[in-house]
Image (spheres, helix red, strand yellow):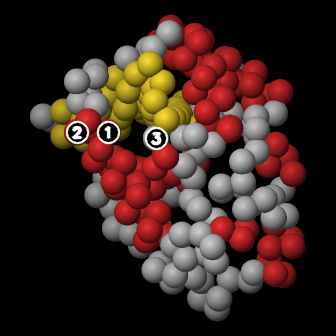
Amino acid sequence: MELLLIRHGQSEADILDVHEGRADFPLTEIGEEQAQKMAQFVREHYKPEIILASPLKRAKKTAGILQEAISCELIEEEDLMELHNGVLAGLPRKEAIIKYPLPKGGRPLHVPIPEGESELDFRLRVERIFHKIIHDYQQHGRIAVVSHGGFISNFFKAFLNLPINSEAIFYTGDTGMHLVEISERGRIIKFLNKQDHLV
């Protein structure tokens, strides 16, 4: 099984300097253009048999554009959503620092953002959907997973069995793609954050 992990295109939150997370901003015009270019590139080089997507607008639209290009089934999975950032969702970053400053030494892993989820909860959710994908969709040779930057970074921690407190961060740009394989040989990373389609 190959998993093609794809981040959504540019969203309105990306240019407003606000906390996004569960704030449901749509793609910008540039974001839609990025998604179109990604979809054509995927169709030509890494065509999946099925698409799984976060139901948040920016990811759902990106996945929909990909689906139109390759004509396969698209399934929304709630667990593919970005970190539930509670009171921070949609809040300007400068305002958030004043209203909800981080505790000294940072927020403990088990403590949720007010009205949101903790890093521990987030990792557990990522682990759950990771294992669901490799079990429930194992009949597919290649699966596209359209989600969010924070989710994808956590997904790699689950894929590589890294600890919850690992300082590793796996960056993904707008419509960046990662390809991994799960087989009898093990868990293989084929490439990270490919954005050739935007060049």
Q: Quadrant of the N terminus?
A: top left
Quarter of the image for residue 61 reads top right
Q: Is residue 79 above or below residue 120?
A: above
Disc number for residue 77: 3
Between the C-alphas of marks 2 and 1, the distance is 5 Å
Question: Is 196 placed left or right of 19 in the picture?
Answer: left
Residue 10 visible, this angle: yes
Looking at this view, is 97 or 113 the one in front?
113
**Which type of secondary structure does the marked residue at label 1 adopt?**
helix
Q: Quadrant of residue 84?
A: bottom right
Residue 170 showing in the rendered view? no
Mark toward the viewer: 3 or 2: 3
Q: Quadrant of residue 163?
A: bottom left
x 44%, y 19%: residue:
73
Q: Is residue 31 left or right of residue 105?
A: right
Residue contact at pointers 1 and 3, CB within 8 angstroms: no
Residue with the mark numbered 1 = 133
> As shown in the figure, which amino acid type bears the numbered disc 2?
His
Question: What residue lies at 38% left-to-right and 27% top-to-bottom?
Answer: 143
Q: Position of residue 127 (x, y in %)?
A: 34, 55
Residue located beneath label 2 in the image: 135
The alpha-carbon separation of the residues under discs 1 and 3 comes to: 10 Å
> Which tag, 1 or 3, sits closer to the chain's start?
3
Left or right: where 95 falls relative to 51:
right
Rate crowding at label 2 as few (under 14), some (14 to 19) or many (20 or more) other CA atoms within 10 Å.
few
